[in-house]
Amino acid sequence: METDIFSQETKVLTEVKEKKESGDSSHDDFSKLVDHYGKLLRTTKKIIKLSDKNEQRLNQLKSEAQETNEQLEGMSAQLSKFLSPQLYDSIFTGSRNGTRVSRRKKLTVFFSDLCGFTNYVESMESEDVTDLLNLYLETMTNIALEYGATIDKYIGDGIMLFFGDPETKGVREDALQCVNMALEMLRELDNLSDQWAKYGLRDQLQMRIGIDTGFATVGNFGSESRLDYTAIGAAVNRASRLETAADNGSIYISEDTYNLIKDSVNAEAMPPIFLKGIGEFNARKVIDSRLTNTVSMELGDRNVSFVLESLTPEQLNAVANSLGKALDEVKSYKGS
């Protein structure tokens, strides 16, 4: 039943009106009316005051909630830098939780290393070493993310990553993406020469890369208080050993990886190589990808490359315009 908080005042007003109309009103009636309306005024003021307090509290709670959300967003943004994007998304969408679970999956595993990096930087200031290493890792990480790799860890100047978990495009496509990514990394490393020079490095740094495809156990390992999302198993060991055995500036892949993508890459067979802890092992050295359209230019002792598939239409137009202008300048210079 709906309650009218002004029912008594309404009743008094009605009675007074009726007595006034009948000519039977008195001073007491009007006094009674004044008293009730005084009470009504006090009640109304209390309601308004309470309403104002509630509104202030609601505004305060809204402000506190907004501040808390901003803090959580900031913490989330910071946390995302310590996790691969795929793992970060799976945690925050609820598809993966913080428990010690693992599963066996077929992965393509990648290891890379900067050849002789430690010797190069022994005489450098620690700040310069930090800047140079971060420049290298930032460049390679951006390429890895473009191809959909899951970044497992950085090991000094080394990188471990894999394809196949938590997201996969299929075993063959994962392997092909990994090899094409490795080829682009080698090309981009050549393009970093000018920036290496700023740190006093006269010689071009080179990478070694090892890739293998096989079953591995992937998931959360560690304690209840500290977990590490990673992959372990024979495929991980073989990829690491292949990277160690690879020539400077080359990509070594296992026969298992090659058999998946042999119609899409050019790779030369090599005599069996000895891998520590594994023994003799058949591997191939990747030459190039048959599916990748690449434009390369030799500039003195440097080679600048563009992977056309990785460029947007705007970037393709910019490259075409720049190359056209450069060609005109060269022709003009040769004719002078």
Image (spheres, rainbow, N blue to C red):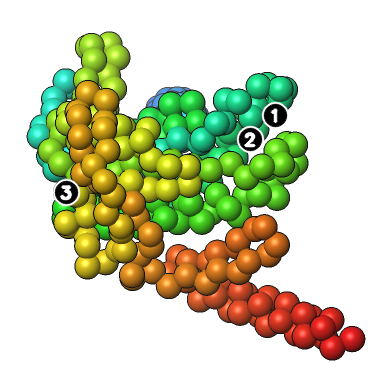
Tell which circle, 1 or 3, labels the residue nearer the N-terminal end: 1
Residue tagged by mark 1? 128
**Nearest the camera: 197 or 136?**
197
Q: Quadrant of the C terminus?
A: bottom right
Q: Are marks 1 and 3 in contact (CB under 8 Å)?
A: no
Position of residue 324 measured from the top left corner of the image (x, y, whole percent): 68, 82
Quarter occupied by residue 124: top right
Secondary element at image label 1: helix
Q: Secondary structure at mark 3?
A: helix
Marks 1 & 2, CB-CB < 8 Å contact: yes
Three-letter amino acid code at the position of disc 3: Asp
Q: Residue at x 75, y 36 (%)?
A: 200
Give coordinates of residue 272: x percent, y percent. Answer: 23, 42
Residue 256: mark in rendering: 3
Whole-number angstrom distance, CA of label 1 to CA of label 2? 6 Å
Count of numbered tags:
3
Label 1 amino acid? Asp
Query: With 67 as the anchor, is 257 left or right in this view?
Result: left
Residue identified by numbered label 2: 132
The mark closer to the camera, 2 or 3, is 3
Q: Residue at x 27, y 11 (%)?
A: 225
Label 2 neighbourhood size at 10 Å, few (<14), some (14-19), many (20+)? Answer: some
Image spot of residue 322 (x, y percent): 68, 76
